């Protein structure tokens, strides 16, 4: 799984994703890459309208991750591009490492990706309601967080925010803890 194998410099991984993104749309229109949705026979054609970069960290908008969204529902993220391949969201939150059990501190870049997927994609987009515009902000790069692992899968997380931490800054308001 991604969290078990992801190694290397995050900047190099992002540069690789940027090169992939550029090359993806240079191909002729008859040779589009596709992503096979796990557990089904459906495939998604990789098109500009469903592939996008989003910030990985709240406090560093230059560090981004490449996402594939469902062409029929732009709020549904299907996969994350890292290590020269697309990883289904369901696989990003899995591990084969038996030592990942219970609450585990986020320490590696791979664990930061799992935290991002749990926070921003699963709890933020999939469970958010567009009716009330609820969303979850990505964590900062240095924020202390733990992931709850159960039976080889990340099922929850929590993060610690220090008193006085700015959690949302808008033009007119600062929200502090």
Image (cartoon, rainbow, N blue to C red):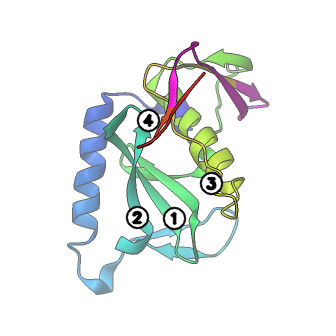
Q: Which mark is residue 58?
A: 4
- Which SS class for mark 1? strand
Q: Nearer the viewer, mark 1 or mark 4?
A: 4
Q: Is residue 37 visible?
A: yes
In the image, farthest residue toward the bottom: 30
Q: CA distance from mark 1 to mark 4?
A: 20 Å
Is 66 placed left or right of 158 in the picture? left
Residue 65 coordinates in the image, percent (x, y): 39, 46
> Cβ–Cβ below 8 Å for labels 1 and 4?
no
Work out whether mark 2 precedes mark 4 in sequence or the reverse, and give the earlier one: 2
| In the image: residue 69, left or right of residue 31 | right
Q: CA distance from mark 4 to mark 3?
A: 16 Å
- Using the numbered discs, state the Cα–Cα distance from disc 2 to disc 4 in whole angstroms: 20 Å
Q: Residue furthest front?
A: 172
Is disc 2 in contact with disc 1, using a CB cutoff of under 8 Å?
A: yes
Looking at the rendered image, the disc whose residue lies closer to the viewer, 2 or 4, is 4
Residue labelled with disc 3: 125
Q: Residue 116: x and y, percent?
A: 54, 38
How far is the residue under mark 1 from the one under mark 3? 11 Å
């Amino acid at each position: 799984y991604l969290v078990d194998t992801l190694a290397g410099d995050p900047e190099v991984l992002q540069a690789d994703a940027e090169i992939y993104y550029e090359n993806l749309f240079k191909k002729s229109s008859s040779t589009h890459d596709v992503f096979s949705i796990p557990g089904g026979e459906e495939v998604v054609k990789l098109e500009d309208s469903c592939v996008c970069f989003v910030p990985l960290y709240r406090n560093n908008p230059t560090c981004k991750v490449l996402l594939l969204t469902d062409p029929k529902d732009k709020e549904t993220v299907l996969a994350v591009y890292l290590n020269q391949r697309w990883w289904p969201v369901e696989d990003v939150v899995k591990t084969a490492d038996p030592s990942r059990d219970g609450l585990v501190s986020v320490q590696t870049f791979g664990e930061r990706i799992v935290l991002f997927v749990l926070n921003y994609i699963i709890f933020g987009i999939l469970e958010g309601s567009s009716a009330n515009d609820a969303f979850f902000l990505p964590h900062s790069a240095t924020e202390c967080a733990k992931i709850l692992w159960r039976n080889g899968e990340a099922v929850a997380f929590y993060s610690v925010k220090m008193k006085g931490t700015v959690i949302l800054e808008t033009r007119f308001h600062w929200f502090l803890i």
